[in-house]
Amino acid sequence: MKPPEDREMPLQEHLAELRRRVLRVFIVFVIGIAITFRFSGDLIRLFWNYILPDTHVYVVAPTEWFMVQLTFSFSVVLVVVYPYLVYELYQFAKPGLYEHERKFVKTFLPFSYILFLVGVALGLFVIVPKVFSVSMLFNMGANPFLTAKKTLYSALKIILAFGLSFQIPVLAVIAVRVGLIDSKWLKSKRWMVYLAVFILATNLTLDISGISQIIVLSLVVVMYEISIVLARIMEKNIKVAK
């Protein structure tokens, strides 16, 4: 028996539906960035003084400050509109889900955003200040020349990486519940995932000390292993229900 709204759709119709939802998300992001951009300068200075007190911010290119403001605004908007992004993804996948699967997914979606905020808060209030304070200890008494782009990009990437890493258990549980993957699949892919995360962390965080890479990789490993445990529990519950 097929899901109640499941029907054969041409590829073009699927793409058209996806395009509509992507366009809606894009419009929301554009509006949010346009609003946030007006206050981004003050927000960046507050953020800078929080993570690197008593230091100056420098720019080395005419357009650098503009790009930093744009990136910072995008990051703030992402945190705020993340539930809407998840909602559009759910609406796109909804026709292919059974009623019990829909109820299960809708139950877990609020937890998804809560975990996302927990990860962002952990990165913002604990990890980034600690990483930056430790990194400043290696200046050997020299005055650091901290550019806005590299410094803020590194901080924002760590914060968002923590938020997204906390999504791994939720995504794994949902995927197992709807039959897309199982715990064996997760176990077989773990080393590929860890290697990919390490490469991404090395190339994105711009931290030559290796501290931020180790932190991000450790978090992903913990979240992924938790996902495997939760996947096994979910599989047992599915068998019992049957």
Image (cartoon, helix red, strand yellow):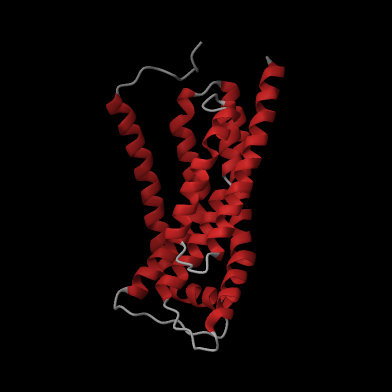
Q: Nearer the viewer, residue 6 or 220?
A: 220
Question: In this image, 154 relative to 66: left or right?
Answer: right
Give the mark count.
Answer: 0
Q: Residue furthest top?
A: 1
Is the residue 223 above or below the residue 176 in the image? below
Question: Residue at image x 50%, y 73%?
Answer: 43
Question: In this image, 84 relative to 238: left or right?
Answer: left
Is the residue 63 above or below the residue 180 in the image? below
Location of the C terminus by quadrant is: top right
Q: Position of residue 229 (x, y in %)?
A: 67, 35
Snapshot quadrant of residue 31: bottom left
Q: Nearer the viewer, residue 198 or 68?
A: 198
Snapshot quadrant of residue 212: bottom right
Q: Position of residue 191 (x, y in %)?
A: 53, 41
Residue 110 showing in the rendered view: no
Q: Position of residue 80 (x, y in %)?
A: 52, 55
Q: Position of residue 173 (x, y in %)?
A: 61, 34
Question: Residue at image x 62%, y 38%?
Answer: 227
Residue 181 showing in the rendered view: yes
Q: Residue furthest right?
A: 240
Question: Residue at image x 63%, y 43%?
Answer: 111
Is the residue 153 above or below the residue 118 in the image? below
Is the residue 176 above or below the residue 81 in the image? above
